[in-house]
């Protein structure tokens, strides 16, 4: 997978700066007035190009509804849209094959997959309830499609910052048995 690492890094740093700015603005921040006053930016892992991976799509035609528990003891309904197959470095730096499921909200328009996940950083370096990635695509998904999935864009849901939000918990099929030291970190 060839891409311009320097341009990618610049775009990632710019994205992170914009996100920090959004956290400082009352109408777009999950932080209350006190939290915004003390806010000095989100914590991130260093940008890691090895965690920008190419995923291969395997469509899930089951139309099965998946009920995800939430941080507020509720439930949200999703449909399993596709399995995303990729390789990512393990602790020794060797590529290891992994799979995550991409979901859509029931009755959601196409063009985006919701990819909630847990990994070996969950609860230690990252939010204890897991992190999310949004995978955006044009057109219609087909078996064998490939897309970049950038774990450097993995983020903690708003419920990490306030109880006012109800966030879906990653289902067990999206619990990775390796560490993904990329994206947002979490400090309580």
Image (tube, rainbow, N blue to C red):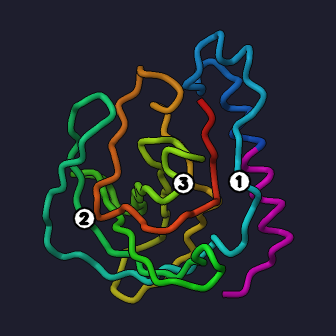
Q: Magenta includes 4? A: yes
Marks 1, 3: nearer the viewer = 3
Residue at the (42%, 66%) spot, across then down? 176
Which residue lies under the disc numbered 1? 45
Q: Residues within 10 Å of mark 1 (few under 14, many from 20)?
A: some
CB atoms at circles 1 and 3 under 8 Å apart? no
| Dot placed on the residue nearer the N-terminal end, 1 or 3 | 1
Which residue lies under the disc numbered 3? 121
Q: Tell me the distance, in whole angstroms, between the alpha carbons under discs 3 and 2.
A: 25 Å
| Magenta-colored span | 1-16
Residue at the (77%, 67%) spot, across then down? 8
Residue 188 image point, x, y percent: 59, 29
Marks 3, 2: nearer the viewer = 3
27, above or below 187, in the image: above
Q: Which mark is residue 80?
A: 2
Q: Tell me the distance, in whole angstroms, between the alpha carbons under discs 1 and 3.
A: 11 Å
């Amino acid at each position: 997978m060839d891409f311009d690492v320097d341009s990618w890094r610049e775009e990632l740093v710019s994205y992170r700066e914009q996100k920090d700015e959004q956290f400082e603005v009352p109408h777009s921040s999950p932080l209350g007035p006190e939290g915004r006053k003390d806010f000095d930016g989100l914590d991130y892992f260093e940008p890691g190009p090895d965690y920008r991976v190419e995923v291969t799509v395997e469509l899930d035609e089951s139309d099965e509804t998946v009920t995800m528990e939430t941080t507020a003891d509720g439930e949200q309904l999703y449909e399993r849209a596709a399995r995303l197959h990729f390789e990512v470095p393990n602790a020794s730096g060797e590529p290891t094959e992994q799979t995550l499921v991409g979901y859509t909200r029931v009755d959601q328009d196409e063009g985006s997959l919701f990819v909630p996940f847990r990994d070996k950083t969950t609860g230690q370096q990252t939010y204890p309830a897991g992190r999310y990635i949004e995978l955006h695509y044009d057109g219609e998904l087909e078996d064998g499609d490939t897309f970049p999935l950038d774990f450097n864009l993995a983020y903690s849901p708003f419920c990490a910052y306030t109880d006012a939000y109800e966030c879906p918990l990653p289902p067990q099929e999206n619990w990775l048995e390796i560490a993904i030291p990329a994206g947002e970190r979490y400090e309580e």
